[in-house]
Amino acid sequence: MIARIWHGYTTKENADRYEKLLKEEVFVGIEHKNIGGYKGICLLRRELENETEFTTIMQFESIEAVKQFAGPDYETAYVPAKARQVLKRFDPKSVHCQIIYELNY
């Protein structure tokens, strides 16, 4: 299993708007792509002093599934135009880590 990790930052004023955009449009759009091996996404939010940080952690069965989602240059961040309008800044690349252990209760 592969975790695709990415960070984006908004102004505090745009944070709720960005969160809503992710939940109602971006994540739904990803789901509708019907990517084989896509297992889901986790959204994290953290309030910083002058901005709000969002972290997404997508899960894929393999790096091949990631490439099906993101293309051959799979490390490049997936940031739709509407999201770019709300973001203050973001990581240009996503990080990919192999999930070697997970414990859920």
Image (cartoon, grey):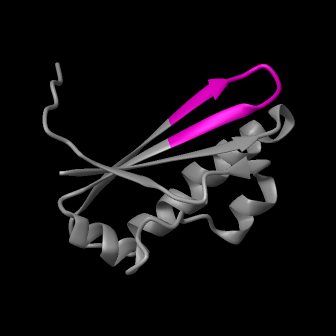
Residue 51 lies in the magenta stretch: yes
Q: Is residue 50 left or right of residue 26?
A: right
Which residue is at a point 78% across and 31% down the rendered structure image? 51
Q: Quadrant of residue 17?
A: top right
Say which of 5 and 24 sits in front: 5
Eyeballing the image, is 17 above or below 53? below
Q: Quadrant of residue 85?
A: bottom right
Does residue 75 show up? yes
Eyeballing the image, is 78 above or below 2? below
Q: Is residue 88 left or right of residue 81?
A: right
Q: Quadrant of the C terminus?
A: top left
Q: Quadrant of residue 16?
A: top right
Residue 76 lies, in percent from the top left, at 51, 67
Which residue is at a point 58% across and 30% down the rendered structure image? 45
Give the magenta range: 44-55
Hey, which residue is sitting farthest bottom in the picture? 72
Eyeballing the image, is 38 above or below 22? below
Residue 86 lies in the magenta stretch: no
Main SS category, magenta section? strand
Say which of 30 and 2 sits in front: 2
Does residue 34 show up? no
